[in-house]
Image (cartoon, grey):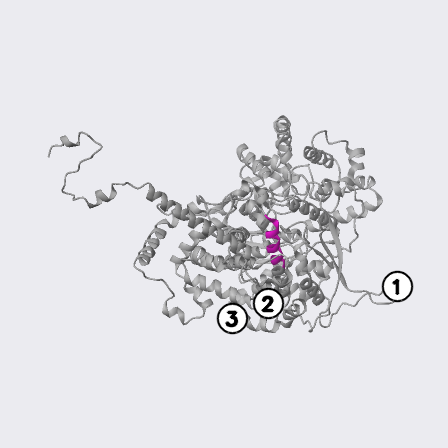
Amino acid sequence: MGVRGLTSYIAQRAEIYLKPYELHSTALVIDGDNLSCNLYKDVAGSYSAFGGDYDDFYRAVVTFFQVLAECNIRPYVLMDGGYEERKLRTVSTRLRGKISVIKKINPNASITLFPLHLKEVFVDAVRDCGVPVMRCVFEADDELAALARKLNCPVLSYDSDFYIHNVKYIPLITLTVKVLTKQVKDKNSGKQKDSRDLRRNEAKNVEKRTKANKIVSGIQTSEQAVTPKGNTKTYKYLDCCIYRVSHLCGRSTLSPEKLPLFAALLGNDYIARSAFKNFFAAGMGKAGRSRKLKIQQKRIAVILTWLKEETAESALAKVLSRLKKNQRDSLVSQVNAAISGYSNELCHAYDFFEEHYDNAFPYIEPASEGESSDEEELVSLDENVSEGEEIEEQEDAENQEEEQQDGDPAEDQEADSGEELEEEEGETEEVEVEDKTLLFPQWFLDKLYPAHLSRYFVDLMHLRKYINNPQIEHFPFHDSNELALPILNYVFSLLHHVEGAKTEPELDADGSPLPIEFSYLTRALRVTNVRYLKMPIEKVPAYAFEPSNPDPRHLRVVFEANIPYADAERLFSRLDELPEDLRLYFLAIIYWLHRSEHCDLVHLHALILSLLVLRTIDVKIPAEREEKAFRKRFGKTLKAERAVRNKEVAEGVKRGVKPALLELSIPDRMEHVPKSDCYLTQERLLPHFHMQEIFKKKFDLYSTTVIHAFAEFQAVVYQLNGLNSLLDFPLPSPRMNQLYCGAFLYNIYDLLRNRADVRYHVENFLLPDSKLMFDFYCYLYDWCAEFIPHWKRVEVDQSAAKAQQKKRLKKHRQATRKAEAKESNADPNADMVKDADPEDDFFDLNNKFCALKVA
């Protein structure tokens, strides 16, 4: 949700509100959505303009959790669910902001745009690390706080909401993901206490990282340290800062029950700051004249000072007296909800982890005396706060320019959302339910909690809405998800035609049944705006939907109804010829080839090459994307192997497939690809994993039309995988980290688009060092060839063939000219020198002193 300006306020006073902390040997509750977005932001950089490099992101997530494991930290990851109805207005405003960013996208932009499969890849990585993960019904904030209180452990996130929750909170910005080692001094060293304040330089570093919005500059595991002599024991830890709510409350500053009102007065996603305009003008005066963000910082200080003299009841009464009548109920319900979340002990995550994971909670510590006496340590906090504010007043003039970048994370791209909401007054009323899981049937929760279903399923069930977050796509075209709308519609139909619990349609004034429909929020065509479409159920499911034992034939129905020119029965019968992990992915490819107007066969070649590299090479050898680092690390291996193969070529020995492997099918041979093939092939392909240098000078050469076709394909995979998960995975879910790399796909497409014979180019220039890989590439393409629609079966592009012929003729003419020039510039006496006897004396006719040579 986010409390506006509070993150910056705390960061500017880090030495007052944050305490140094060594994170080790403890449980840790992690905000999964927050961590995934911030990790991707640090990993992807400008490469987010190509639709998502899931391979790099997956490795970063795995490395992050390996670092936690090295410090004996037991993480628990909670993911967000659907949106609550009261937040829809904010969602719409932010959607409009994302659309405006996409309209002006260029590959050199510093703005990070999150790809479609980001959260699914994150969940795959978390599961692979053996970390407990659960998807909540709605926003995970209250569940995170409840679980952290049960386990008496910190919460790791970067959300200003946790500054007002009654939990130990580690801001992600303060975590240094580098394993450090320390000696154990005494037996009680494991029980930490806030022993000191942050030093001035440490506090400045927190403020600097907050403004830069950089979470992880480089994840590092511990290096091999020298083992100390004797019986000295050591422990590994991560350096960070911790925050407790008592740091903000202090002595006689705020009481915990005032915190929800304090957060509401600052403004959040549920209530506009402008709602308190009359209150600030009449009750508290102006916060000061300055730039917008600086005003927000001063407003926080003014509110804290005012609340100091008020009780929770009197403060709320004064605020309500200055609000409009239609806003009062909303504020009261929001404050009450925050108070209940503040002390909520209902924790579904605890029960879920205990039931589904062995030894789920190895670290559960009771609250120590040191933690319960925090307020005693903060006796002088008021004095420190006043001193800190005096120092800040002196530095205001120096920080004028830096203040422009100040703000909460995830608000930077949506800085105007609060201003647009200021014009809005009313809030949609929503029935408050203490336990919100009661709004959903148990079968749905059983599929949602293990994070098998994406978050949009909650919106379809609860709100009957689908919020289509746009990808990087070509703005004049329709949104990329439109291609997959029939699949989404079928999913919605299944959700409302559950066997034994079918949704009954409502009746209109005449008693006629109204269609069961959902609202589809997406970008409007060619303009920066959001459009709302009503999507009624197109067709009742062909088979009954029993959630506990779903019929896998529902998957085939989608293909029979939406791609009539493909033989669906033949298509599904031939799936057995593919590896299991590729079957759903290639079903998506066939669907996309038939439905998309913007893809061609070169897109198909690029997709096959991408999965070939990520699924084979990255599994066999360490994944290294930097060319210099790759050659430094594997240079000797490359040189030795290249020498062996050059010798074989010189001797006329032709490399082929070993006779033992010929007995295996082509897909089964991929497990036996030698590492030498992977090293040599990766060396050739490494440049294609990076953005082309020409884009840094002429970013208008970047083509969103190419990206749009790949965006459509991602949407098809996303929706098809959603249907597959609802049916309890009749086919394994595709692992996008082993299949899709946006920058590589774009570069390979750009390389192959003008080739007259793509297969020839792949064989001789991209995969000449591995016969096994080339055979698998041909096998996959030939499997697809049978189902390629007839209007896309172009044998040879005539324009490309002519261009290729011109290039060959030009090269031939250049070679002829060079040979002729070489002959014309040759020495006329070369034959005489060649035929001369080496024992005869040489007489240089151009040197008159040559005859004086003494024998």
Which amino acid type is marked by label 2?
Phe
Whole-percent x, y for residue 553 in the image: 63, 72
Q: Secondary structure at mark 2?
A: loop
In the image, what residue occupies the spot 76% across and 67% down? 503
Q: How many marks?
A: 3
Q: Earlier in the sequence, mark 2 or mark 1?
A: 1
Relative to 426, 29 lies left or right: left
**Residue that label 1 marks:** 509
Helix, strand or loop: magenta stretch: helix
Q: From what the image shows, is residue 500 above or below residue 433?
A: below
Whole-percent x, y for residue 383 in the image: 63, 31
Q: From what the image shows, is residue 824 above or below residue 662?
A: above
Relative to 323, 625 lies left or right: left
Whole-percent x, y for residue 850 in the image: 17, 32
For the residues bearing labels 1 and 3, Cβ distance under 8 angstroms = no
**CA distance for labels 1 and 3:** 55 Å
Magenta-tinted stretch:
703-715
**Residue that label 2 marks:** 729
Q: Which mark is residue 577?
A: 3
Whole-percent x, y for residue 714 in the image: 60, 57
